[in-house]
Amino acid sequence: MSGYRVNQGLLADSPAVPFVFNNRPFSGVQGDTLASALLANGQTLVGRSFKYHRPRGIFSAGPEEPNALVELRTGAFKEPNTRATVVELFNGLTAKSQNHRGPLSFDVMAINDRLSPILSAGFYYKTFMWPKAFWEKLYEPVIRAAAGLGSLSGEEDPDSYDKGFLHTDLLIIGAGAAGLSAALTAGRAGQRIIIADEDFLPGGRLNLESFLVDDMPAAQWAAHSIAELRTMPHVRFLPRTTVYGAYDHGVYGALERCTDHLASSDGKPRQILWRIYTQQTLLCAGATERSIAFGDNDRPGIMLAGAVRAYLNRYGVAPGKQVAVFTNNDDGWRTAADLINAGVTVTAVIDTRSGEAPLPIANARICMGSEVIATQGRLGIHSVTLRNGQTIHCDCLAVSGGWSPNVHLTCHQRGRPVWRDDIAAFVPGQTIPTGMRVVGAANGSLSLTQALHEGHDAALQALQASGLTASANTAPKATAESTDLSAFWHVAGCRGRSWVDQQNDVTTKDIALSYQEGFRSVEHLKRYTTLGMATDQGKTSNVLGLAVLAKLSGKSIEQTGTTIFRPPYTPVPIAAFAGRARGKHFRPVRHTPSYQWANQNGADFVEVGMWMRAQWYTQQGESHWRQSVDREVRQTRESVGICDVTTLGKIDIQGADASEFLDKVYANTFSTLAVGKVRYGLMLREDGFVMDDGTTARFSDTHFVMTTTTANAVSVFRHLEFCRQCLWPELDVHLISATEQWAQYAVAGPNARRLLETVVDAPFDISNEGFAFMACAELSVCNGTPARLFRISFSGELAYEIAVPARYGHALMDALMQAGQPYNVMPYGTEALGVMRIEKGHAAGNELNGQTTAANLGLGRMVSAKKDCIGNVLSKRPAMNPDNPIELVGFVPLDANASLNAGAHFIRPNGEPNLASDEGWMTSVAWSPSLNGSIGLGFIQNGSQRLGETVIAADLLRSKHTEVKIVSPHFVDPDGERLRG
Amino acid sequence: MDNSTPQAELHSVSPLGGVEQVFSNERSGDTVLKEINALDIVSIATPRGGQSALSNLLEQQLGVALPPVGQVNRAGSTVALLGLQSDQCFLVTTEQTRNPVQRLKLITGDTAYLSDQSDSWVVLEISGDLSHRALERICPIDLSEPAFTLTSVARTSMEHLSVIIEKLSESRFRLYSPRSSANSFLHAVTVSINNVMPNFLSSDIPEEL
């Protein structure tokens, strides 16, 4: 317990905020993060490490935090692995430390630390090999349980999420010194801007330092700037928003945390995933401080020096009562100076560099050219040991190893950063995303003055690129600062382990082991040791790890290179990616115009793509779907039934060259189709396989209406558009989907004509002579409603399809049912439709599976030899026309009581069910009320020549072998007398 | 043949039953979402090489020329031509008739290929100060001036649904989306409004609209 509130920092007069950590009540103030509030309460120990369960404290003050991961909230709202350093404190916040068994201060799994010699990097590749079966059953589960982070609630996330699209001329990423300077310049000139900052208090470093900007405290200047920007209608300010990815064509991904700082979302989206489209981008993402590797440098109380300064200046919190500073640069000295100014004791400043102290630090021991080689303290640091053997007491050690520019977004399109020796860091390379400029610390310009100037200058360039003129203003002026640094990475010869990546428990020894075992590329090092993985993505450790590897290999860091940065910059919840697309709103639902009618009349619906189709209509007394389906089939075949076929694709094709176009896309000929007639059409893919089938009606010389299967409605339309626009742009052909326009119903059965006679308006002649099989017409029904009538049959019965504008669909269904009462008309669903088409031997989706040819389907003669069409050439390949082609035939079981299964494969009697003996497969089966038994359709080699032969339908999935006889696929009315009657 | 039995005329049903919702809020004012039913929509395709002839004819007869893609040409408040693709536009008119193709054919003759689209779309209008913010949640295109003006029209997608969007004023937009998924579309727009309204509980959103 060492931290405490020194003053109010920027949080003067902020109200108290109670919260709970590990079931204990605490109090912070509004404006705190969970980390600052814990430090203010003296809570140094906040978690346990990933692998060795070592005690860990708060290391940073931002999104780079590797240690202080907590489970936030409770119940279904629980979120593990939340970085305490970015969690905004709210009234009632509940957090728990994670990854320990027993109390946080006495984790029994800390035994792992004692076992560290056998748990080094990649240990699971080399140990736990015997007995082999134990790996999955014992070793892996135990290792996973021991090396975990937080735990999930296991419940559905009760929060809602949203997404959105934003457009701007200039996206400014980061509202720190550079970002605000740029935004003021561009905003005052009237440029449309979005400025996003991941913090809830924009200002970045300006809120953390004791500098002056334009003669006022930096934080005050930031607040004034933001207030001015908020008054500009063309400026969109997005606080609590992380731009996490840079994508092609000026698209950026951003996550806005809308209600994470509130106790309840109150029904609003918790987070919004924005897609931002921008012409230009200024990356003002700042820099991240890194540590130095030395013995036991992971104890609670050891923090980044900049973080110590941030807690002090922004939150008024001193992380310790006796603070020592270990640095290789001037920035560490500023931490010491600010601590002294706040009245905090600085016990020592240890600088790896020789020479004069950059700043006077009162009452502190100044150790130039010195190093920390060890630290002491079990649950929190209490002293450090220097190379010369001196021991210095401290309850907080502030470490600064220099700053790494946040170049991540410059690399998301495979850009490679370049090394700069003067700041010992990678800076953006030449290949950064188009339209992006990198400004300030992110560009390696580490002083405040540089950031303000670069922001201003970059905004001027952006204005010029947009053709705008800047108003007369200059860059803000700031206190001068020194950023001198001498690269220093690793204190050699330490006894304790030196930690590089604290989140993944990677030490300098692990890197050495990786190098020794041949994993010497940075990418291999990352995978072998897990360096740079998990929530922090190595923000504080990557460069340090590279430096250690470079030293081992005798190369420079530049030669060693860096791993590629990929999105996201910081973690994005999967729920945010899902957005609203959850549960029944996962995708849209399509209803036919008579959906309500079907719903009111006992329909049981099935999802067909996005459509909801009635699969059968249950009547009183029916307890099994087969009862309903059998009834619907019988009634249709005996009298009349009505089926909603609105979902079939309907494509309106018009133009002087429409018939030529159809000849090219269909295998059979349509230019010869007479006006007022319909023809079945077979469409091939380029490779010669069948793509889709349907009927096409001709309403005039230049006007056709094509129907497609429900499943292929979109793909056929897309295919036709491709043909029209790309293959034959010279043709006068025009397409538009009419699927939505028409409500369409199949009226089938011996009484279909009698029923329709009552609804078609005079003088239309619906007699067999006046409107023969395969006729079509535009007419009116029910006293003037425009309609289309097609005499086509899928069921094999005398049948029609009648279409009216969708607004009349519900009413037409009512009218047909009313008019059909004398014939006991019944609606039938997709199951009865399926049964009747199998009885008739019509192919459907099961047979048009993309692997079958026209010949396979028994439609080989439809591929016209008199003209060319898509798929014609390749359909003639030898492999498509073997001597023993599979052919569509019917099957009935020898045992009349046996049922059939689709998917069964055909073998000869006494044959072994394997690939060598496979002769085909069953595609569709049904129980036929008309034949009072099971029937099936399927493909079998030379099927048409083998009628009457017995084969085995072998269903290995269900362990069922059934003897079946090969029969004609036309079980009902093979001569077509009914449909022509 | 027996078509002498008198049949009652079929009554029409709009995709959403003429829904109109007002989202009131003290801070943001009213946002109104309503279904527009009284429209005839006809697709007009231009024969190859016949653009000028058709455009002149339409200008003479209806007072509007064929628009370029992405533009709306309006004649008063009753007729608009929406330029949707290189050889296709939509005629949208408040002057309804039972067979709009038949009527338009009297004007265009063989200079155009016509297809009735009046029943293909559900048409929603969203208006109010929050309309732009609400559409940001589902509409991928830039609706601000000068990218999208009062004479702009665009085909886009919202929540996986194809949508034609037209700007009637700075805070009023008309959205056309396929009829069959009208409920899903209404839900998408309603949730968007709710999500941008201050202090509006999502529990107020009806599950089935």
Image (cartoon, grey):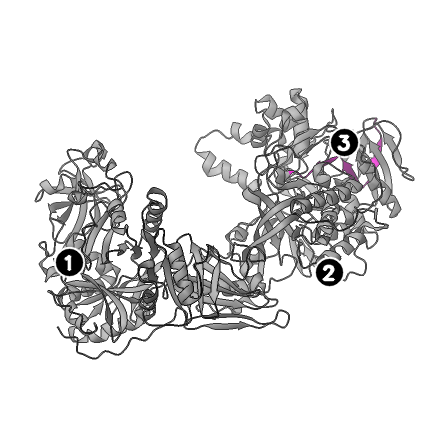
Q: Within the magenta stretch, is there residue A734?
A: no
Label 3, label 2: how far apart the Cα atoms are: 38 Å
**CB atoms at circles 1 and 3 under 8 Å apart?**
no
* Disc 3: host chain: A
User: Which numbered disc, 3 or 2, marks the residue that appears first in the sequence?
Assistant: 2
Which segment did they paint magenta? A388-407
Residue at the location (24% across, 70% down)?
A: A780
Label 1, label 3: how far apart the Cα atoms are: 90 Å
Asked whether B51 or B122 is in front, the reply is B51
> Which kind of residue does numbered mark 2 sit on?
Val
Tell me the quarter of the image containing the N terminus of chain B: bottom left
Pinpoint residue A338: horizontal percent, then vertical percent.
85, 44
Pinpoint residue A517: horizontal percent, then vertical percent.
57, 22
Pinpoint residue A272: horizontal percent, then vertical percent.
57, 55
Residue wearing tag 3: A374
> Which kind of residue does numbered mark 3 sit on?
Ala
Residue wearing tag 1: A796
* Disc 1: host chain: A
Residue wearing tag 2: A17
